[in-house]
Amino acid sequence: MANLKEIRIRITSVNSTKQITSAMKMVSASKLKRAQRAVEQMRPYSEKLSKIIQNVSSNTGESENVYSKESENKKVLIVAISSNRGLCGAFNANVLKRVKLMNIDKYRNSEISVYAIGKKIQDGLKGKYKGNLEALPEEAFQIFDDLVIEKASVYAEAIMKAYRDETFDKVILVYNSFKNAGVQIIKEEQYLPIEVDEENDNSNIDYLFEPSEEEILSDLIPSSLKIQLYKAFLDSFAAEHGARMTAMHKATDNAEDMLKNLKLTYNKLRQASITNEILEIVGGAEALVG
């Protein structure tokens, strides 16, 4: 059994850890508010724009819209988005597991490339897959230091160029979608080719294009794809802080429970030590009297 000194050291250590986890929880809660506001403002616009693009694509041929052409999915690019830091529960592990599962199961007969955005997913894959993308920053995880649409556009343009050049037949986004502070949903979202909404009742509407259809397709679709990727970054960023806040909250609660148990054990040992000392004093006094 540990002695009093060891328990005191343990109490000091756990108390220090509790202060750190509590501070990290408050920092993540502060950052979560801003990230949540950003993604909630972006979602309606992104979803509506994607719906419009799907409707327009359903009325155009593959020759008119290069981003909606179907292929055999022989060459698949997975864009995996994680965080740069840990201490956020299973946030990063879920992305890594999904990527590996896709490789083993869904696309086992395809040539898979993975472009990892986020330090943790890069470390997890350890260079097993290569993205084969040009014109991208060497340090892909730096985007989260200043998350703006201009930086996201760099990645989107490189992915679109690779798709147009037929380097890849299909592009999939894998990331954590933000639901609330305690829930993150792992998503596997088709980025390219653009999925046609076959169940839409308006798919047979004859659209009137102003300006020309070619101008709209050449401008609106790339803009939509940039916004879709930017929304995925915002989703992942907000989900990361939600996951970290929840993890640090649980860690703080666990530290408090551990401190209670340690203090109880310490008091018991201290009381036993005091009792033994009293008994020794009484025993010594009786020996002197006798």
Image (spheres, helix red, strand yellow):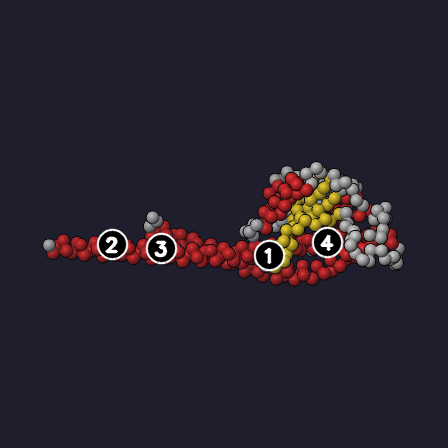
- Which numbered disc, 3 or 2, marks the residue that appears first in the sequence? 3
Left or right: 10 in relation to 174? left
- Which numbered disc, 1 or 2, marks the residue that appears first in the sequence? 1
Left or right: 283 in relation to 130? left
The secondary element bearing badge 2 is classed as helix
Nearer to us of marks 3 and 1 is 1
Residue beneath the point at 66% across and 43% down? 102
- Which numbered disc, 3 or 1, marks the residue that appears first in the sequence? 1
Nearer to us of marks 1 and 2 is 1
Please say if the residues under marks 3 and 2 sit with CB atoms less than 8 Å apart: no
Residue 265's label in the rendered image is 3
Query: What is the quadrant of the C terminus in the image?
Result: bottom left
- Which numbered disc, 2 or 4, marks the residue that appears first in the sequence? 4
Q: Position of residue 127 (x, y in %)?
A: 63, 39
Circle 4 residue: 228
Q: Position of residue 248 (x, y in %)?
A: 52, 56
Residue 276's label in the rendered image is 2
Q: Is residue 124 above or below residue 233?
A: above
Q: CA distance from mark 4 to mark 1?
A: 21 Å
- Kind of residue indicated by mark 2: Asn
The secondary element bearing badge 3 is classed as helix
Please say if the residues under marks 3 and 1 sit with CB atoms less than 8 Å apart: no
The secondary element bearing badge 1 is classed as strand
- Kind of residue indicated by mark 4: Gln
Residue 114's label in the rendered image is none
Please say if the residues under marks 4 and 1 sit with CB atoms less than 8 Å apart: no
Q: CA distance from mark 1 to mark 2?
A: 53 Å
Residue beneath the point at 36% across and 57% down? 264
- Kind of residue indicated by mark 3: Thr
Q: Nearer the viewer, residue 137 or 179?
A: 179
- Kind of residue indicated by mark 1: Val
Determine crowd level at label 2: few under 14, some 14-19, many 20+ residues with C-alpha closer than 10 A: few
